[in-house]
């Protein structure tokens, strides 16, 4: 099985920060070394899928600059085949990842070339599934009421590919926050066979600051199913993850890969608890690992609970800094 992972890619720059680090004008603070590596949905999900034994091809857009060359070099070094469209009209996307010990991460992010990605250059031949990541960080993909995203998903389904979609938190100060995300998502969900965001991603898209409860997670999953999605797996941090699946008609009416799941998956509802962590290294890439674990298990024909457990275990391995291939039973 081959999965095309397309959309948002960037270079992650992660300085090692002391416990008490603050930005104070005029002050010099000593920090630790900088980790430099590929990041974003395309790399994070693609590399996790590869570790799980799935053949992948990455598709994204980078700049004709030093960061773009560094990103391409890393993908080659890791043996990750990639179709990187190169442009001189924007700089390669990058994130400065701020992780104080014992706290969740924060990002300073430059969208750069990701703003130009519109899906037209994604090559779908010989693939079995398409995973698209982070439309809120891909302004070109959600332009004109998300017409490019809808076109990409329709093209994939016409080729018989399973379609998978992950979201990112919508920055309330970014231009894309002015879009009608409820309308966009309700038009995209019928073309989405697998949806695997976090509950925070969904809540930010809807502009809803309600406290996250298990009931709210289930309500959002049911909304996505009613709107036309096939399989919805919402991650909810320490609460675990919730999976909801459409009825058999929706699964059988999709692509062959989805239709083959109908007997075991149709109508399923269930929670999987978050695995107990023995160590904490970083939450960076955990959501993407969750998506990869779900897809890998699904492609191998696992039942819904086993697939949800694989998603949770893959995310936990990433958080603990453990090798996914050795940590996740398949």
Image (cartoon, grey):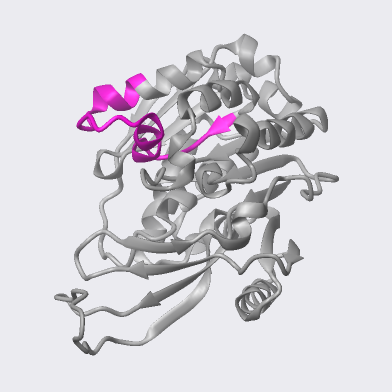
Q: Is residue 305 left or right of residue 135?
A: left
Residue lying farthest right? 125
At a point 64% along the width and 33% down the height, the residue shown is 144
Q: Nearer the viewer, residue 75 or 107?
A: 107
In the rendering, at what x and y percent does residue 48 appear?
55, 57
Residue 189: in magenta span: no
Q: Nearer the viewer, residue 264 or 293?
A: 293
At a point 70% along the width and 65% down the height, the residue shown is 89
Q: Is residue 41 left or right of residue 191?
A: left
Q: Is residue 138 above or below residue 95?
A: above
At a point 70% along the width and 47% down the height, the residue shown is 3
Q: How many marks?
A: 0
Residue lying farthest left? 20
In the rendering, at what x and y percent does residue 330 appear?
53, 48
At a point 68% along the width and 60% down the height, the residue shown is 61
In the rendering, at what x and y percent does residue 187 appear?
59, 22
Q: Is residue 7 visible?
A: yes
In the rendering, at what x and y percent does residue 134 appear?
53, 46
Residue 197: in magenta span: yes
Q: Nearer the viewer, residue 279 or 18?
A: 18
Q: Is residue 190 above or below residue 212?
A: above
Q: Is residue 123 left or right of residue 54?
A: right
Question: Which region shows up in magenta?
Answer: 194-219
Q: Is residue 298 visible?
A: no
């Amino acid at each position: 099985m081959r999965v095309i992972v397309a959309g948002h890619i960037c270079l992650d720059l992660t300085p090692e920060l002391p416990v008490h680090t603050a930005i104070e004008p005029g002050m010099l603070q000593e920090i630790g070394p900088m980790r430099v590596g590929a990041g974003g949905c395309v790399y994070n999900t693609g590399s996790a899928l590869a570790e799980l034994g799935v053949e992948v091809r990455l598709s994204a857009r980078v700049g004709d600059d030093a960061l773009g060359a560094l990103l391409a070099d890393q993908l080659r070094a890791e043996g990750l085949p990639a179709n990187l469209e190169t442009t001189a009209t924007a700089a390669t996307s990058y994130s400065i990842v701020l992780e104080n010990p014992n706290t969740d991460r924060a990002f300073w992010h430059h969208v750069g070339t990701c703003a130009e990605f519109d899906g037209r250059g994604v090559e779908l031949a010989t693939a079995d599934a398409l995973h698209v990541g982070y439309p809120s960080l891909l302004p070109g993909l959600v332009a004109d009421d998300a017409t490019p995203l809808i076109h990409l998903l329709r093209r994939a389904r016409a080729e018989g590919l399973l379609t998978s979609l992950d979201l990112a938190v919508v920055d309330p100060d970014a231009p894309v926050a002015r879009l009608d995300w409820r309308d966009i998502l309700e038009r995209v969900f019928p073309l989405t066979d697998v949806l695997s965001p976090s509950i925070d991603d969904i809540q930010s898209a809807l502009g809803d600051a309600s406290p996250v409860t298990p009931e709210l997670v289930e309500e959002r999953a049911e909304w996505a199913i009613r709107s036309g999605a096939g399989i919805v797996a919402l991650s909810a941090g320490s609460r675990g993850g919730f999976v909801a699946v459409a009825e058999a008609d929706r699964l059988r009416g999709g692509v062959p890969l989805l239709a083959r799941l109908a007997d075991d998956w149709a109508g399923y509802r269930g929670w999987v608890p978050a695995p107990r962590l023995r160590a904490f290294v970083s939450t960076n890439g955990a959501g993407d690992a969750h998506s990869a674990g779900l897809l890998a298990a699904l492609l191998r024909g696992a039942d819904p609970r086993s697939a949800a457990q694989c998603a949770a275990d893959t995310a936990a391995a990433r958080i603990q800094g453990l090798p996914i291939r050795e940590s996740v039973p398949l």
